[in-house]
Image: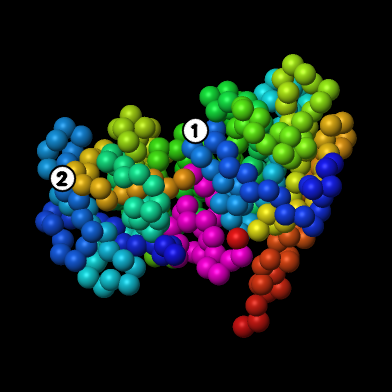
Amino acid sequence: MTDPWCWLALVPDEPVGARTASIVEEDGRPAGWLGIWDRSDEGHPSAALRMDGRAASPESGEALPWLSLCVGGSPRAFDDGGVAVTLRRCLAEPWPGMRSTLLVDWHLIGGAVSAARRPQALADDPFARLFPARILRAREPVLYAVPAPTGPALSRYGSGNPWPWDRYAGQVT
Amino acid sequence: MAPLLSAGNRFPDLELVDHGGNIRRLSDLVGGDPTLLHFYRGWWCPKEQTFFRGLVRLQDEAEVAYTRFVSVSVDPPQVTAAFRAGLGGRWTFLCDPDRVYLDALDLRETTDTLYNPYVPSAFVLRPGLEIEEAWNGYWFWGRPTAEELRMAFRRVTRSIRDDWEVPKA
């Protein structure tokens, strides 16, 4: 059973004890390292954010090399109207392969990450209207395809879990 | 409606391609929430367009109510994706252009030999795919109204959410 969330951070040096990938900018310049830590791993950096745990699991789907990472600026309350409008756009528009909100805590969203086979699928990331966006490429497999949520439901299943994690713990399915 | 698809029975766990070209399984799409499963003739039918306009209005409530929609037709993914985008639908559309489930579900519209579509029909499913209520929409007035869907979603939600009654402090 995949954990609803894990920690994700882009850091300058290769982190120890994390699943990692070296990251480059769209033009090939080095951009640091993407690190993923299990939810229970206390070794994550303080800047790490909560990501849908399925996106870190190879069992979820194919590895997706291109990333749209939208982080920075001021976190927003998840109930902010701008966040709701963005989530609606994500459901209405073609699904790139994987998306996850990046949560600071149960209340605040600090950004989002999306991944795709090709950078063109990330060119109009709805989250880029909320947070500064960068198109990046992972040199090693680190993010995996997660199917689009069924819709139209877009609430979080447990306020501490990132969207689009789509069920409560212990639910009959 | 075929006896197989009446209330209390388990709906078959379909596996079809979605509007984006991805293979999806119905049980995964339903997950743990009340779900409207809706079969429609195709993009070309004015009755379907009218019914969809009602669903598009209802999706604004469903999006905050932990409720899911799935629509199924014989249209191929590219046609379905364009139709969905034109409607403004924010839920999953499944495609059965090879008509794999048409006879298995006994949902072939026998009076349309041109398109060979699904009979318009609607089901509210519970988690686990149990049919809560079914509607035969061959005639337009056989389809569920928004109010009937709300009532079915309420019944399912009340029965599956342990905290329907506000938890005591």
Report the magenta stretch's main SS.
loop
Q: In this view, does B145 lie to the left or right of B159?
A: right
Q: Within the magenta stretch, is there residue A170?
A: yes
Q: Are marks 1 and 2 on the same chain?
A: no
Is any part of residue B58 visible from this angle? yes
Q: Which amino acid does label 1 sit on?
A: Gly
- The local secondary structure at tag 1 comes to loop
Q: Is residue B46 left or right of residue A96?
A: right
Q: Mark 2 lies on which chain?
A: A
Q: Nearer the viewer, residue A47 or B160?
A: B160
Q: Which quarter of the figure has residue B34?
A: bottom right
The x and y percentages for residue A115 are 34, 42
The circle drawn on residue A31 is 2
- Range of the magenta residues? A148-172
Q: Which of A170 and A45 is in front in this view?
A: A170
Q: Quadrant of the N terminus of chain B?
A: top right
Residue at image coords 34%, 53%: A58
A142 above or below A96?
below
